[in-house]
Image: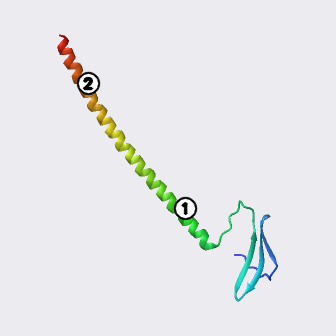
Amino acid sequence: MLVLSRKTGEVITIGASVTVTILGIDRGVVRLGIEAPKSIPVHRKEIHDKIVEINRQAVKTEFNALKKAISKARILLKNELQSNNVIEKKLNNLEIFDDNQNK
């Protein structure tokens, strides 16, 4: 970790596109001004942690929803195949019945 001492009004640069300006210090609270491109997210740590947790939950939820959908699709497909087998057997029985009638 890099540790720097700065006075009010002084600036720290991070890379070529991020600057941190010390705006003021009052009773142990440091106010910072951060300039960064919109493509670089800037959040307080507690906000960043909350975003990460929400994203984790969303991934789990989407994965669980996908698993449920696949399971439901398998059941529907299985039922459809069983139904088709029943229909096919009935049709075969009808064909046998028709063949016997024609003789």
Identify which residue is drawn at 82% across, 79% down.
9
Compared across the picture, whether 92 is left or right of 59 comes to left
Disc number for residue 91: 2
Q: Residue 22's x, y, as percent?
A: 77, 78
Query: Which of the image's four quarters has the C terminus?
Result: top left
Quadrant hosting residue 35: bottom right
Q: Nearer the viewer, mark 2 or mark 1?
A: 2
Circle 2 packing at 10 Å, graded few (<14), some (14-19), many (20+), is few
Q: Going 41% across and 47% down the picture, which residue do you hit? A: 70
Q: Which residue is mark 1?
A: 55
Classify residue 12 as left or right of residue 70. right
Measured as percent of width and height from the top left, residue 51 is found at 58, 66
Taking 65 as reference, is 27 above or below it?
A: below
91 over 100 or under it: above or below: below
What residue lies at 21% left-to-right and 15% top-to-bottom? 99
Residue 37 picture location, percent across and down: 75, 62
Is disc 1 surrounded by few (<14), some (14 to 19) or many (20+) residues within 10 Å?
A: few
Q: Is residue 14 above or below residue 9?
A: above
Coloration of the structure image: rainbow
